[in-house]
Amino acid sequence: MTSSDSVQKAPAKDPWDLPDVSGLVVGVIGGTGPQGKGLAYRFARAGQKVVLGSRAAERARAAAEELGHGVEGADNAECARRSDVVIVAVPWEGHGETLAALREELAGKIVVDCVNPLGFDKKGAYALRPEEGSAAQQAAALLPDSRVTAAFHHLSAVLLQDPGIEEIDTDVMVLGEERADVETVQALASRIPGMRGVFAGRLRNAHQVESLVANLISVNRRYKAHAGLRLTDV
Ligand SMILES: NC(=O)c1ccc[n+]([C@@H]2O[C@H](COP(=O)([O-])OP(=O)(O)OC[C@H]3O[C@@H](n4cnc5c(N)ncnc54)[C@H](OP(=O)(O)O)[C@@H]3O)[C@@H](O)[C@H]2O)c1
């Protein structure tokens, strides 16, 4: 017996061994826009229970009915209360105010921020720099009792919403502070055929991920595409 045999290391955890998230309720705040509706549609189509949120319950119910697959509509506060995992899909301009108002309803929940703070001028899209560092860090600052993560920044709402498309050929970068929460969001992303959720760092690195959308918009405009991302060798 050597000294290295006596100190037995726990086997490294398989990073692709992700939890079963099929029973979790997914909420989408700002779910009546293209991104929220697209994500709601894909998760519901994958068998997830989805509650779509809006500032007006009626608008949410109308959008939910349009999507089918058992999606339900509610105002943003009820959407947050009823969900285990809550995706934030409002425009950057309404981000801070929306989250500050939902602090209680979002306490204890996994919050997934997919907001890209961008500006547009005649040269195209460019990244804004939020005071807190990123939209995700602003969410974490406003929601101290929530488990804030960031993901789904680089998806095309056009592809998400197209019922003729079976698979979304892309990776999803998932950021967060707690491994278990990140893995839940990775697992959720992986429920959508063609998609893979990949851990991509802590929230302090969310700014680059949010900003990269300005580059993808440039790609899309030049090549008339709906570009996604693939991470190789993982
Ligand atoms: N579009 C994409 O392809 C895409 C891809 C990745 C990430 N994202 C990110 O996802 C977010 C949503 O994108 P989107 O294109 O779906 O946006 P959007 O259509 O402009 O907004 C989504 C919904 O947010 C609500 N809303 C609008 N202004 C608001 C405000 N000031 N405060 C609170 N709620 C407000 C509206 O719903 P109600 O009026 O019903 O409340 C609206 O339908 C953005 O932050 C974007 O950066 C978008």
Image (cartoon, grey):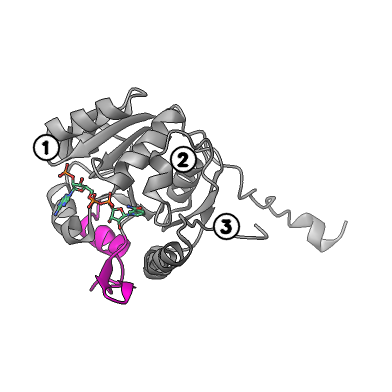
Q: Tell me if residue 197 can be seen.
A: no
Q: Is residue 208 left or right of residue 32?
A: right
- How far apart marks 2 and 1 lie (CA) works out to 27 Å
Q: Is residue 54 left or right of residue 134?
A: left
- Taking the spot 37% from the left edge, 54% from the top edge, the residue there is 149
How many numbered callouts?
3
The residue at which mark 1 appears reads as 56
The residue at which mark 3 appears reads as 230
Does residue 225 belong to the magenta stretch?
no
Q: Split into 4 quadrants, where in the image is the C terminus? A: bottom right
User: Does the beta carbon of the residue at mark 1 sit less than 8 Å from ligand 1?
Assistant: yes
N-term mark: 3 or 2: 2
Q: Position of residue 98 (x, y in %)?
A: 16, 52
The residue at which mark 2 appears reads as 188
- Taking the spot 25% from the left edge, 63% from the top edge, the residue there is 138
**Where does the magenta region start and end?**
116-145
Rate crowding at label 2 as few (under 14), some (14 to 19) or many (20 or more) other CA atoms within 10 Å: many
Q: Amino acid at mark 2?
A: Leu
